[in-house]
Image (cartoon, grey):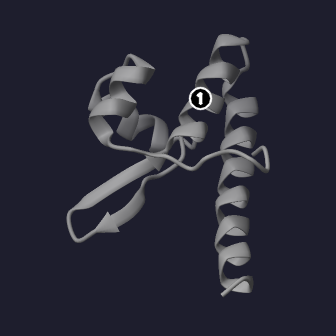
Amino acid sequence: MHPHTTLRIQRKTEVIAQMGICITTLRTRIQQGLYPPPINLGARAVGWLAHETEAVIAATAAGHGDDEIRCLVGELMQQRAQLGEQYHAHR
């Protein structure tokens, strides 16, 4: 992630519209490691980081295979963890 990326949360309807898929396909891709899992926003709310959706779409458009996209998703999850660490370090 670029250091100046603005973090923006997308809700499920926005993600499936941007990806051009249905909710079942989104769930399947998450289970297969082809899309990052959601972030809990509250008791009954989840969302995704917009730059993660854009990264997966770009990799798909570039013709990357499933293994490459799984690696990308792994990198995105590491970035999420680092964001949390950075937040706690600055508190």
Residue 71: percent from the left, percent from the top? Answer: 75, 41
In the visual, does 6 lie left or right of 44? right
Q: Which residue is drawn at 33% across and 56% down?
A: 46
- Asked whether residue 49 appears in the rendered view, the answer is yes
Indicate the quadrant containing the C terminus: top left, top right, bottom left or bottom right: bottom right
Indicate the quadrant containing the N terminus: top left, top right, bottom left or bottom right: top right
Query: Residue most toward the left?
Result: 44
Q: Residue at x 60, y 38 (%)?
A: 51
- The secondary structure type at the circle numbered 1 is helix
Placement of 20 over or under 74, stated as above or below: above
Placement of 15 over or under 73, stated as above or below: above
Which image quadrant is residue 65 in?
top right
Q: Residue at x 72, y 39 (%)?
A: 72
Residue 79: percent from the left, percent from the top? Answer: 72, 57
In the visual, does 38 lie left or right of 81? left
Q: Which amino acid lies under the numbered mark 1 shown in the image of this protein? A: Glu
Residue 18: percent from the left, percent from the top? Answer: 42, 22
Closer-to-camera residue (8/49) = 8
Q: Residue at x 47, y 43 (%)?
A: 30
Reading the image, the residue beneath label 1 is 54
Closer-to-camera residue (85/90) = 90
Query: Residue most toward the bottom?
Result: 91
Which image quadrant is residue 13 in?
top left
Residue 50: percent from the left, percent from the top? Answer: 52, 39
